[in-house]
């Protein structure tokens, strides 16, 4: 049986007036992950617009080869710097939501 990858689902909830600033901070995070984490197989930011209330959220979808890669990611200076910047800058409406998950049912097409 093959080992399924580990997926991180992160939701970033910027203050409306701080969305562009938070979105810009992702550039450093993305570069840091791409340059330093070869076992990160996917690292994408997705933007959601709530048509009812207007606030936007950023959904990060990240896929890692194994749990060691997830642990390594959590220690990446770029990841730590992003978390510190959004916290100290008071840029979010609520804390970062981060879940580490694994697929258990379903399928994927290549």
Image (cartoon, rainbow, N blue to C red):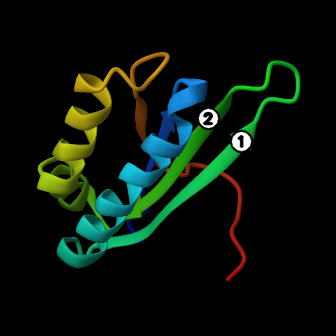
Residue density around tag 2, few if under 14, some if 14–19, many if 20 or more, within 10 Å: many
Residue 9 percent location from the top left of the image:
49, 43
Residue 57: image tag: 2
Q: Which residue is mark 1?
A: 48
Q: Using the numbered discs, state the Cα–Cα distance from disc 2 to disc 1 in whole angstroms.
A: 5 Å
Q: Is residue 55 above or below residue 81?
A: above
How many numbered discs sit on the rendered protein?
2
Residue density around tag 1, few if under 14, some if 14–19, many if 20 or more, within 10 Å: few
Q: Is residue 64 above or below residue 67?
A: below
Label 2, secondary structure: give it.
Answer: strand
Residue 32 percent location from the top left of the image:
23, 66
Residue at coordinates 40% horizontally, 26% vertically from top-left?
91
N-terminal of the pair, mark 2 or mark 1, is 1
Q: Is residue 75 above or below residue 19?
A: below
Residue 104 visible to the viewer: yes
Residue situated in front as seen by the camera: 50 or 69: 50
Residue 76 percent location from the top left of the image:
15, 55
Residue at coordinates 49% horizontally, 34% vertically from top-left?
12
Asked whether disc 2 touches disc 1, contact meaning CB atoms under 8 Å apart, the reply is: yes
Q: Quadrant of residue 99?
A: top left
The quarter of the rendered structure image containing the N terminus is: bottom left
The quarter of the rendered structure image containing the C terminus is: bottom right
Residue at coordinates 87% horizontally, 21% vertically from top-left?
52
């Amino acid at each position: 049986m093959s080992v399924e990858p580990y997926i991180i689902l992160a939701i970033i909830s910027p203050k409306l007036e701080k969305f562009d600033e938070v979105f810009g901070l992702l550039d450093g995070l993305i570069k840091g992950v791409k340059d330093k984490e070869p076992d990160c197989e996917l690292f994408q930011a997705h933007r959601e617009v709530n048509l009812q209330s207007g606030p936007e959220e950023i959904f990060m979808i990240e896929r890692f080869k194994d749990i060691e890669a997830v642990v390594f990611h959590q220690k990446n200076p770029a990841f730590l710097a992003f978390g510190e910047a959004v916290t100290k800058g008071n840029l979010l409406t609520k804390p970062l939501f981060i879940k580490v998950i694994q697929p258990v049912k379903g399928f994927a097409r290549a």
